[in-house]
Amino acid sequence: LISRAFRNELEIPQWRDFTAKVKEIFEDTRKVTEGEVASYIPQLARANPNWFGFSMCTVDGSRCHLGDSKVPFCLQSVSKAFNYAAVSTDVGYEAIHKYVGHEPSGRLFNEICLDSEQKPHNPMINAGAILVTSLIKTKWPMAERFDFIIEKYRKLAGTYPVEFNNATFLSERDTADRNYALAYYMKEHNCFPHNEIMNLREELELYFQLCSLECNCETLAVMAATLANGGINPLTYVRCMSPEACRDALSLMFSCGMYDLSGRFAFQVGLPAKSGVSGAVMVVIPSVLGMCIFSPLLDRTGNSTRGVAFCRNFIKHFSFHNY
Ligand code: DON
């Protein structure tokens, strides 16, 4: 019995009841069929609209996987939360927020705009995320910068894989006029710390590479659980992020993580979350668990329709809403 307990193989009745209800909510959410698969690059357009997966991982390492939890997807904008936490752990809060704000922009995620201090509004929209990416180990060669950050992701995921999808990266780079425009606009306004000497093309490539990191629900749930656990991976017990960086990332996810739906999502679900255009939604219940819902059908705000519906449904049954 004791060795099973150490291997996390003991099922406590509450966990069984909890996962049974979650499975019911998951099956109920399958009825949602609205939304469109992202089509701006072929790698996303080829996603099967029926894919639907779910995983959760608690801060004590218990896990539950449902449906297509092993289907790989690219992190896309979900990476923005981890990049922010990684850079914040590395250089600290002030070094980041000298260059990027905290406010929801109230605009589209890729809109060309800056706040009243001429900073991108927050790290969860494209402008802010490009800026945060440019702060990753600024003086290192590009290959080392990529290795540094993918190693961070792998630590966050513990025993689960994180890969790089080169086809997605190449397509992203080929269809990135808006992101180039955003980066040049920021350079024009002296937004970057090393504005004069930087190679914008390389910075954008790193940003696209991080959007092209590939995992599945099972991996992303563990990464989310690491954020829920103050930066310590619940499976390996390795510290991956500072507790302050996790807290700050979760605060920004709460106010800005779901694009134009962020206010309504915070109101209705009351939890920090981050979505990506591949159809992933990562949700964190601080000190309790991390979860990932994946379904490629997106609403007009770029959020997974089933992902959002699942969260609303989940909160109706469990009182995890922050308020
Ligand atoms: O930068 C972009 O446009 C994309 N590669 C990532 C954006 C994204 O996931 C937006 N999602 N709703």
Image: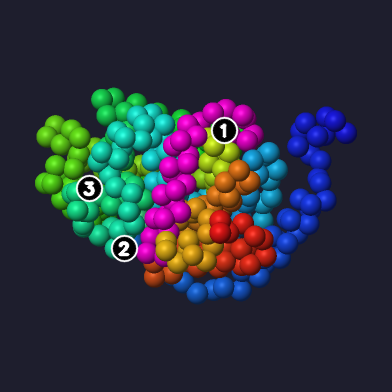
**Mark 3: secondary structure:** loop
Residue that appears at 68% across and 46% down: 63
Magenta stretch encompasses residue 247: yes
Residue that appears at 78% across and 31% down: 6
Mark nearer the N terminus (1 vs 2): 2
Mark 2, residue position: 106
Mark 1, residue position: 232
**Mark 1: secondary structure:** loop
Q: Quadrant of ligand 1?
A: bottom left
Q: CA distance from mark 3 to mark 1?
A: 31 Å
Left or right, 53 with respect to 245, comes to right
The answer to whether residue 272 is seen in the rendering is: yes
**Mark 2: secondary structure:** loop
For the residue marked with disc 2, what is the amino acid?
A: Gly
> In the displayed structure, would residue 189 be above or below residue 146?
below
Magenta stretch encompasses residue 67: no
Question: Magenta region: which residues?
Answer: 232-261
For the residue marked with disc 3, what is the amino acid?
A: Lys
Mark nearer the N terminus (3 vs 2): 2
Left or right, 195 with respect to 232, comes to left
Q: Quadrant of residue 67?
A: bottom right
Give residue 300's position: percent from left, percent from top: 39, 70
Mark 1 C-beta closer than 8 Å to ligand 1: no
Quick one: label 2, few (<14), some, or many (20+) residues within 10 Å? some
Name the residue nearer the viewer: 188 or 172. Answer: 188
Can you tell which mark lies on residue 119?
3
